[in-house]
């Protein structure tokens, strides 16, 4: 994982439901833990665009349903600020499933992908159609 150039607001919490934006067969995933998050006792962990999270597949294909997997958050509704002063926000919260080597499991991503997620995980940028 590489560092991100922007200040990402943590707009997605543990327990949030995200749309799965790739073609792996999952439709809805739920965030279980945020990798690398160290917080205070009893505080709900948060993550934002470009964060690596552990998710459970809640809705989708029968083969992949109820599976625990790693994912990368590629879109969030809560706006975040870039270094040049612009603020970016998306219509929905979305993630892409990845394997242990942090490579995308799918072959295609539906919708836009934030540039910050591609900075950190360059393999996602190879299958992205729109980068914002």
Image (cartoon, rainbow, N blue to C red):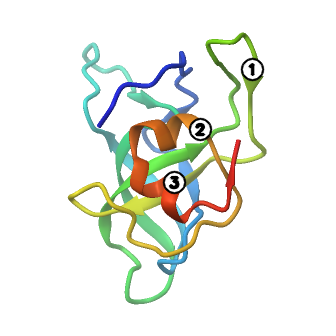
Judged left or right of residue 76, residue 106 is left
Q: Residue at x 36, y 43 (%)?
A: 52
* In-front residue for pair 114/67: 114
Residue drawn where x is 53% and y is 65% of the image: 127
In this rendering, is residue 63 above or below 89?
below
> In the figure, 32 relative to 67: above or below?
above
Q: How far apart are labels 2 and 3 at the CA level?
A: 9 Å
Residue at the bottom extreme, as displayed: 62
- Marks 1 and 2 sit apart, C-alpha to C-alpha, by 13 Å
Identify the image quadrant of residue 132. Answer: top right
Q: Residue at x 32, y 72 (%)?
A: 67
Residue under label 2: 115
Does residue 49 appear anywhere in the picture? no
Where does residue 14 sit, x and y in percent of width and height? 42, 38
Q: Is residue 54 left or right of residue 47?
A: left
Q: Which residue is mark 3?
A: 125
Horizontally, residue 86 falls left or right of residue 17, namely: right
Mark 3 or 1, nearer chain start: 1
* Number of numbered markers: 3
Q: Dot 3: within a 10 Å radius of its alpha carbon, few (fewer than 14), some, or many (20 or more) residues?
A: some
Residue 65 location in percent, x, y?
Answer: 41, 78
Residue 17: x percent and y percent? 55, 52
Badge 2 density bin: few <14, some 14–19, many ≥20, Cα 10 Å:
many
At horizontal 47% and vertical 68% (from top left) the residue drawn is: 58
- Using the rendered image of the protein, determine whether residue 115 is visible from the camera's viewpoint: yes
* Of residues 92 and 32, the one drawn nearer to the viewer in this rendering: 92
Q: At numbered mark 2, what does the secondary structure look like: helix, strand or loop?
A: helix
């Amino acid at each position: 994982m590489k560092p991100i150039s922007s200040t990402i607001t943590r707009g997605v919490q543990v327990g949030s439901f995200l749309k799965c934006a790739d073609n792996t067969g999952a439709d809805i995933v739920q965030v279980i833990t945020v990798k690398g998050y160290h917080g205070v006792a009893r505080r709900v962990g948060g993550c934002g665009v470009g964060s690596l999270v552990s998710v459970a597949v809640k809705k989708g294909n029968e083969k992949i349903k109820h599976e625990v997997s790693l994912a990368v958050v590629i879109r969030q509704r809560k706006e975040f600020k870039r270094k040049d002063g612009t603020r970016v926000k998306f219509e929905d919260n979305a993630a892409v499933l990845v394997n242990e080597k942090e490579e995308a499991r799918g072959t295609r991503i539906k919708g836009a992908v934030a540039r910050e997620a591609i900075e950190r995980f360059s393999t996602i940028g190879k299958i992205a159609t729109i980068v914002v």
